[in-house]
Image (cartoon, rainbow, N blue to C red):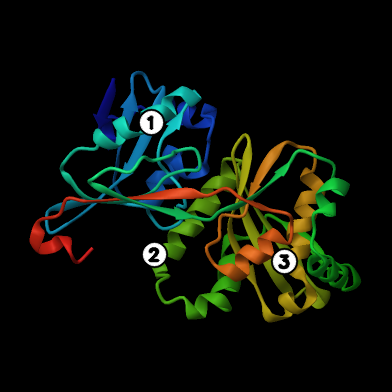
Amino acid sequence: MIKFVKHNDVDTEKWDKCIRKSVNCLPYAFSWYLDIVVSQWDALVLNDYEAVFPLPCKSKYKITYSITPFWVQQLGLFSLTCSSFSRVNEFIEAIPNSYRYIDLNMNFNTHLSPTSFSKIGTNNNFVIHLDKAYSSVKKAYSKNLLRNLKKGDSNNLQLFKNDSPNSLINLFRSDKGKYLKHFRDEDYKRLETIMHVAVHKNCGQIVMVYGEGNRLLAGMFLVFTPKRVVLLFTGNSDEGRALGAMPFLIDSFFKESANSGIVFDFEGSNNDDLAQFYKGFGAVNESYQNLKINRLPSVLKYFK
């Protein structure tokens, strides 16, 4: 039986156990992560937490919405067994009618069937399975990537692990962040909190690249689950791009993690340039769907 459970009534111990042991475990669905990225979330729960479906929610003008939060790529159904995924539509139908507008990204294992009341879209996400030796991983690298890695080797780049979250965030804000006006101060504060909590829980790692003169060139923040590591956030500089710092950074992780069996998740991308960069490592597309349901009053429906 699928039950709707309000946030305060969620058994977070059972919830997190279900997420951790699910066949499609992702960091975004753990209770601690949801508590950071959204002020309120409810849930759909099958029996005694055999499968769960988080519902981030917010209200405006007394209308309740469920929208994928910032710093979350995929949610949807998480289950201990593959058989539950055949019940996806049952979970969708169990979302209370009080949720008047829904715009949620499902996860790579949640496959939706078209209905008369929903719209379904598809997004790209590139991953690499690190289940082989590094020499085999490197065989899939593009010629352009190999050229960039030679730059890193010849410029004496150095790795430093577990630098401060603000060092990475400030690097991003001084570069690409200057042009991304939809990033708000509160979004960066949430990211900083995610970083601190993940590192404290031993499921997050900040890795930076420094050049000569101790100049910070690039960095990345990784979040780990038992079978997957997600590249949640990166920062780069003009000098870092010129010296091949980001390829050097990612390649260094692959050297360490080859043969581990984990999946490296680039967390994107629908952007053609980024997709090409990820493909240069031999990444393959593991697409995920987006669900939209519009139950708004007629006067509001066409504004969404």
Farthest residue, direction right: 154
What is the C-alpha distance between the residues marked 1 and 3? 36 Å
The residue that label 3 is drawn on is 246
What is the C-alpha distance between the residues marked 3 and 2? 26 Å
Q: For the residue labelled by badge 1, is the local secondary structure a helix, a strand or a loop?
A: strand
Pointer 3 local density, CA inside 10 Å: few below 14, some 14–19, many at least 20: many
Q: Quadrant of the C terminus?
A: bottom left
Picture quadrant where residue 249 is located: bottom right
The residue that label 2 is drawn on is 186
Nearest the eye: 143 or 231: 143
Tell me the mark number nearer the camera, choosing from 3 and 2. 3
Of the residues shown, which amino acid type is indicated by label 2?
A: Glu
Residue 131: which disc?
A: none
Say if 154 sits above or below 42 in the image: below
Q: Is residue 167 visible?
A: no
Q: Is residue 42 left or right of residue 75?
A: left
- Please report whichever mark, 3 or 2, sits nearer to the chain's N-terminal start: 2
Q: Quadrant of the N terminus?
A: top left
Q: Residue at x 48, y 54 (%)?
A: 193
Q: Position of residue 288 (x, y in %)?
A: 48, 48
Nearest the eye: 84 or 149: 84
